[in-house]
Image (cartoon, grey):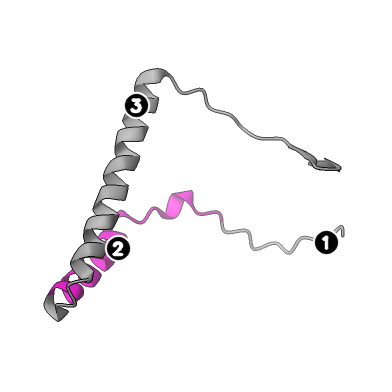
């Protein structure tokens, strides 16, 4: 349930406590993802068609292999708007 009073918005959320080791690992993982994203961007900026197609096909294959359908929530019920 969301309650709004002025600029303060309070939501019920599930919180997960993360210890320092997990936080460091998550930070390193994030840095790796950012590094790889920039690396792909720089490679694509070479405008070499072969490298661009390899990057696109590699991303598509990676998406197909690692896409997690269990994390998706398919809500097919139509909810009534309360606004």
Q: Which mark is residue 81?
A: 1
Q: Quadrant of the N terminus?
A: top right
The residue at 19%/77% (across/down) is 47
Is residue 52 in the magenta section? yes
Whole-angstrom CA distance, mark 2 to mark 3, is 29 Å
The residue at 16%/71% (across/down) is 54
Mark 2, secondary structure of its residue: helix
Q: Nearer the viewer, mark 2 or mark 3?
A: 3
Determine the image quadrant of residue 26: top left
Q: Is residue 80 above or below residue 3?
A: below
Please state the extent of the stretch shown in magenta in the rendering: 51-73
Determine the image quadrant of residue 41: bottom left
Q: Quadrant of the C terminus?
A: bottom right
Among the two numbered marks 1 and 3 on one chain, the one whose residue lies closer to the N terminus = 3
Residue 13 appears at what percent x and percent y?
65, 35
Report which residue position mark 2 lands on: 64
Among the two numbered marks 2 and 3 on one chain, the one whose residue lies closer to the N terminus = 3
Determine the image quadrant of residue 50: bottom left
Report which residue position mark 3 lands on: 24
The residue at 58%/29% (across/down) is 15
């Amino acid at each position: 349930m969301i309650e709004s009073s002025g600029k303060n918005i309070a939501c019920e959320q599930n919180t997960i406590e993360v210890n320092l080791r997990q936080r460091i690992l998550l930070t390193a993982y994030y840095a790796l993802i950012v590094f790889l994203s920039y690396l792909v961007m720089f490679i694509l900026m070479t405008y070499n068609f072969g490298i661009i197609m390899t990057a696109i096909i590699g991303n598509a294959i990676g998406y197909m292999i690692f896409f997690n359908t269990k994390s998706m929530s398919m809500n097919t019920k139509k909810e009534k708007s309360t606004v």
